[in-house]
Amino acid sequence: MKIQHLPRRAIGCLAFCAAGLTAPASHAEEAASPHTVTSNVGFVSNYVFRGITYTQNHPALQGGFDYAHASGLYTGVWGTNVSSDAINDASLEVDFYGGYAGTVDDWSYDIGLLQFYYPEHPKLPGTNESYNTLEAYGSVGWRWLTLKYSHTLTDFFGFNHDSMGGGSSRGSGYLELNAKVPLPGDVVLGLHVGRQRVRSYSAFSYTDWRASLAKTFGAGWTASLAYTKTNADSSLWVADGKDLGEGHWIVGLSRSF
């Protein structure tokens, strides 16, 4: 977030010098593996994605696994609980993603695919339309700034003629600018602004923004505090009488392995 590439921990392997059968054991040397596998687990006071709460202001337990190759290829899976009011009859969201990322001097790039999947196969109320959504994304970064665009290859969370009475929402997009500014004491200031465009349903389009502070500790621990808000139409982005896009304070604690 929903997609984030967490710090990766190398899995080491030993390789021995094979220049000749008579090479002494003292010539053995350690070679870094091109494969890296990491995991992460976290707790947040509210699961907010692109400014919209999907737990109805309740806590969420989240976690995932990531695999990366030295070539730049990567894949991963990440999951979180959600509210059945925000996502009709669902309690779990699982995200599958994969792509290619790299750096050139102070520049970075990342392209990939992200599948939002709800194992309970919930449908939009009164329809047979699924919330499952596939996005393609690409980003370019310079030092602590990153510009990213995500483009739906399917309908946007089930928005189409059958569910909403309009056209297909395939081709909806999310453009975001993110900054991660390092501060003294292993603290990072995060700043974000994003624009969600819902094709064929412009009334559902909105802008969101977020400010956060994250403090890293030893053994992979990170504590965070964030505030996020949107200008989403409260009469449309509503569930169980609650404004999903209102301002939210979010406290989090996570650990990567």
Image (cartoon, rainbow, N blue to C red):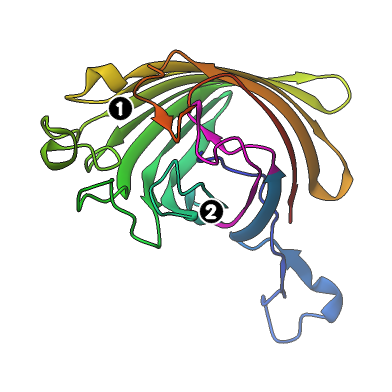
Q: CA distance from mark 2 to mark 1?
A: 21 Å
Q: Is residue 18 above or below residue 207?
A: below
For the point 73% across and 38% down, which residue is it? 252
Query: Is residue 50 toward the left or the right of residue 128 in the image?
Result: right
- Please tell me whether residue 58 belongs to the stretch shown in magenta: yes
Q: Nearer the viewer, residue 256 or 89?
A: 89
User: Which element carries disc 2, helix, strand or loop?
Assistant: strand
Q: Is residue 174 magenta?
A: no
Residue 144 seen: no
What quarter of the picture does the C terminus occupy? bottom right
Outermost residue to the top: 231
The span shown in magenta is: 44-66
In the rendered view, tell whether residue 238 sits above or below residue 129: above
Q: Which residue is mark 2?
A: 78
Q: Is residue 133 left or right of residue 77?
A: left
Q: Position of residue 58 (x, y in %)?
A: 63, 40
User: Residue shown at 58%/39% (left/top)?
Assistant: 47
The residue under label 1 is which amino acid type? Gly
Look at 21% across and 32% down and name the residue there: 171
The residue sitting at the front extreme is 241
The residue carrying mark 1 is: 173
Q: Please count the marks in the image.
A: 2
**Residue at figure coordinates x 69%, y 38% from the top left:** 45
